[in-house]
Image (spheres, rainbow, N blue to C red):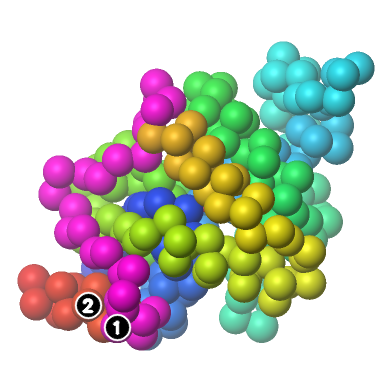
Amino acid sequence: MKKPVIAIDGYSSTGKSSISKVIAAKLGLIHLDTGALYRGVTWFALQNCLNDSGTIDLEKLFSSFDQIELEFKNIDGELVLFLNHIDISKAIRTTEVSENVSFVAKQKEVRDFLLQSQRNLAEKGGIIMDGRDIGTVVLPNADYKFFLTASIDERTRRRYLELLSLGIEANEQQVKENLIERDRIDSEREIAPLKQAEDAIIIDNTTISKKETIDEILSHIRKI
Ligand code: DC
């Protein structure tokens, strides 16, 4: 039997990736965190495509796509993101990347650059992909679609604790402002905005735990 294709979209810091990772392990699926790809392109741009004023030069970035090789490697069961053979899994979580990623992700050229490789990965089935436009644009025919949401204060708390656990210094108010700003840019952009697919199941996990969110998702998958 063909393994399912599952799309998990939603707001920043609703636990999409960590929840998807557990579901992938339980159901024997590959997990792809598509936000990491957008962060990887942003990290590349910050390293290689700045103009004199220190902001990202989009034209330079678009003409550099052939120098960007993003690859997930399975290291001890974890998919680790490499850019041109360098492990960037920690570098893409920095505040600098978080503050620039929505600007990079709203560019049509960037979305086109990453679209086909995401679709190719899902072709054989057996995958859970998390992001913002997976159920609407990348995999509109996914077998199951979920849309995660939670209050801004709860999401701020989660992101703040995540950064601390990664050894990245953070200020809670700044974390909150970054989440609000990113969600705004992601939701308002013209191409593939963050929004729930009409056929997605919405889960608000403000007051439920990660485990309860996972159980809820699994209950839908097992029911259908
Ligand atoms: O999931 P994340 O916070 O790591 O995602 C980082 C950014 O990437 C997010 O602000 C929006 C963008 N993104 C996107 O536009 N489309 C996706 N499928 C995944 C992420």
Q: How many marks?
A: 2
Left/right placement of residue 110 relative to residue 189 reads right
Real-space Cα separation, disc 2 to disc 1, in angstroms: 6 Å
Image quarter where the N terminus lies is bottom left
Q: Residue at x 17, y 80 (%)?
A: 219
The residue beneath circle 1 is 212
Q: Give residue 206's quadrant in the image.
A: bottom left
Residue at the left extreme? 224
The answer to the question of whether label 2 and label 1 lie on touching residues, with beta carbons closer than 8 A, is yes
The residue labelled by disc 2 is: 216
Q: Residue furthest front?
A: 173
At 73% from the left and 61% from the top, the residue drawn is: 170
Residue 159 or 103: which is nearer the viewer? 159
Q: Residue at x 44, y 66 (%)?
A: 154
From which residue to which does the magenta span run? 188-213
Hey, which quadrant is residue 19 in on the image? bottom left
Q: SS of the residue at dot 1?
A: helix
Give the camera-side residue of 165 and 45. 165
Q: Nearer the viewer, residue 116 or 11?
A: 11
Q: Residue at x 24, y 64 (%)?
A: 203
Give how far across and how far down residue 136 sits, in percent: 28, 40
For mark 2, give the secondary structure.
helix
Amino acid type for the residue under numbered disc 2: Glu
Residue 46's tag is: none
The answer to whether 97 is drawn above or below residue 67 in the figure is below
Percent across and percent down for residue 87 are: 79, 61
Category of crowding for the residue at label 2, using alpha-carbon neighbours closer than 10 angstroms: few (below 14), some (14–19), many (at least 20): few
